[in-house]
Image: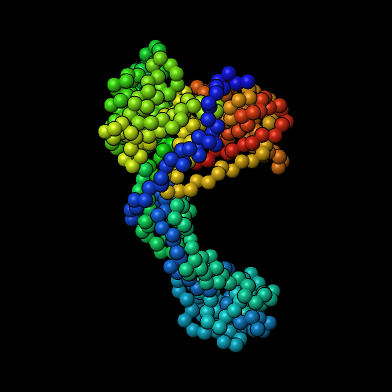
Amino acid sequence: MDGCVQPGLLPVHEALARIIGALKPITVTENIALADSLDRVLAENIIAPINVPGGDNSAMDGYALRHCDARQELNVIGDAFAGHPFSGEIGAGQAVRIMTGGLVPVGADTVVMQENVTRNGNKILINTIPDIGENIRRAGEDIALGSLVLSTGHLLSALDIGLLASLGINRLNVFRRIKIALLTTGDELLAPGAAYHAGKIYDSNRPLLQALLKRLPVEVHDLGIVPDNPHALRTAFLAAQQCADIVISTGGVSVGDADYTKDILAELGEINFWKIAMKPGKPFAFGLLGENESGNALRTTGCWFCGLPGNPVSTAVTYHQLVVPAVRYLAGENPGEPLVIKAIAAKTLKKQPGRLDFQRGIFSANNGINVVSSAGLQSSGVLSGMAKANCYIRVEAERGTVAEGEMVDVILFDRFIR
């Protein structure tokens, strides 16, 4: 049995359910330019204002004609280019030279590709008879006028921006960014770039989280490194409460003599839970900052907090598994469930029953067979292994060591952790 398993550890799925159940998605919106909308959450349904394509157009370079005339010699009476349509109408025995994207002239019902045509001056003969309607992209074939394109709560990608641009849309209503206050705790921490001292370590958690948070619709307030001092922690959390929707801290939520974070959080607000049956990442605290005169937590004006463990891998995994879904939900998005795939363990994976384990792995598909192996040392302090990994090997809480050749669940790393 896992030596870190204790009575009262909250299962991971229940911890996430508690977090989501406590949060209320924001409703404040703002109108922004399409060019500024990457990774923002839509606050409106997008209904297509036009057809895409806007009219019947050619999918090939070739000739537009009436299908009933395809077996006879035809007279070429003009050209149709993208942006420069043919203005007349095709009659019996006639054809129009047409380029890809050019509007199909009135009277034509088929386009024959140029490779299947022999031309002599303004006369053409068709060598391979096309089907009626061949090589024509119909108006609204991609997006129909009045159809739902994107829904409220959609996190906008670069492809979405291109899609909306194709509809002529240049401004959008989105939910405001979530305000995050970020801090790390510990007397042992040095900022990167500072002179090294024995007994100190460089703070990797805050730079890691600063980078990862850029993938979310958030505004980060960096409160820096806070020493292991109750007064300093109290001051930092009070400042965070004034500027943020969520405060994210790392370190100080375990049971060490200098781990004051949990106590200060309990003093200034209320803790929903602080231990979960997860490896890595057992000491994870979630709750609310903010009190009224009677000492009760103010759910209407308070600031949510997520206290992450201090070890860097534990920080990364708990952030990804618990904080990311929480922030996305608070920001107005419905993140949904991660995609879980099955793979064969390439080698033995050591594990003790007791906690849901997110081991860091390297996934590959060899000849159509999914295979996964460990990314190296699984210690919560070894960030190099996670940096090499491309997935989690999610091993059930009740399961022990996984033998070589056994099937395991794999969750590929997504853009919120890479």
Q: Residue furthest top?
A: 198
Residue 312 percent location from the top left of the image: 47, 26
**Residue closer to the observer: 240 or 150:** 240
> Does 197 appear above or below 140?
above
8, 246: nearer the viewer = 8
Residue 195 placement (x, y as % from top left): 34, 17
- Seen as rendered, the residue at the extreme bottom is 92
Q: Is residue 180 visible?
A: no
Determine the residue located farthest toward the front in the rendered image.
Answer: 294
Residue at 39% in and 29% down:
249
Say whether residue 92 is visible: yes
Residue at 41 percent of width and 64 percent of height: 168
Q: Quadrant of the N terminus?
A: top right
How far across and down, in percent of the image, does residue 389 sit? 56, 32
Residue 200, position as x, y percentages in the image: 39, 15
Identify which residue is drawn at 30% across, 28% down. Answer: 236
Camera-side residue of 126 and 359:
359
Residue toward you, 390 or 96: 390
Q: Is residue 407 left or right of residue 268?
A: right
Quadrant assignment, res 199: top left
Q: Is residue 170 above or below residue 89?
A: above
Q: Is residue 112 above or below residue 395?
A: below
